Amino acid sequence: MTQDFQSAHWRKSTYSNGDGDCIEVAISLADIVPVRDSKDPHGPTLTFTVTAWRSFITAIHAGELPAGN
């Protein structure tokens, strides 16, 4: 199933350092959280349930996941 995210409001992390290795997240949709590569805004999009995304963010803030390099 393909979804249209043209009306979504995308944002980059405030931790992005401008080297191009960024993701964008649309937080304006009610039931899902789409994530995409900022270098390829028309490319594939991963989607997560709101519950799964909140769990992921909570784990990051709690230090339960290793930091990327």
Image: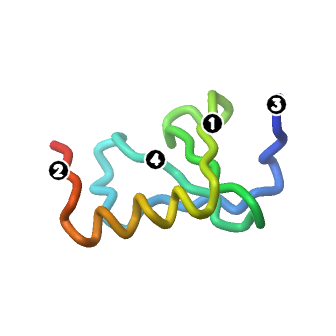
Q: Earlier in the sequence, mark 2 or mark 4?
A: 4
Q: Earlier in the sequence, mark 4 or mark 3?
A: 3
User: Which residue is denoted by mark 3 in the rendering?
Assistant: 2
The part of the image, by quadrant, that contains residue 51 is: bottom right
What label does residue 8 carry, if any? none
Query: Which residue is at the front of the view, 18 or 21?
Result: 21
Residue picked out by circle 1: 45
What is the three-letter code of the residue carrying label 1?
Answer: Thr
Which circle's residue, 3 or 1, is located before the other in the chain?
3
Label 1 vs label 2: CA separation?
A: 23 Å
Q: In the rendering, which numbered label is found on residue 23?
A: 4
Report the amino acid beneath label 2. Pro
Q: Nearer the viewer, residue 59 or 17?
A: 59
Mark 2 in CB contact with mark 4 (< 8 angstroms): no
Task: State left or right for residue 52 relative to residue 58.
Answer: right
The residue lying at 51 percent from left, 42 percent from top is 38
Q: CA distance from mark 3 to mark 1?
A: 10 Å
Q: Secondary structure at mark 2?
A: loop
> Which dot, 4 or 3, sits closer to the camera?
3
CB atoms of marks 3 and 1 within 8 Å: no
Left or right of 58 in this view: 62: left
Q: Is residue 23 above or below residue 29?
A: above
Q: Earlier along the polypeptide chain: callout 1 or callout 2?
A: 1
Residue 64, position as x, y percentages in the image? 21, 60
* Residue with the mark numbered 2: 66
Distance (Cα) linking label 4 and label 3:
20 Å
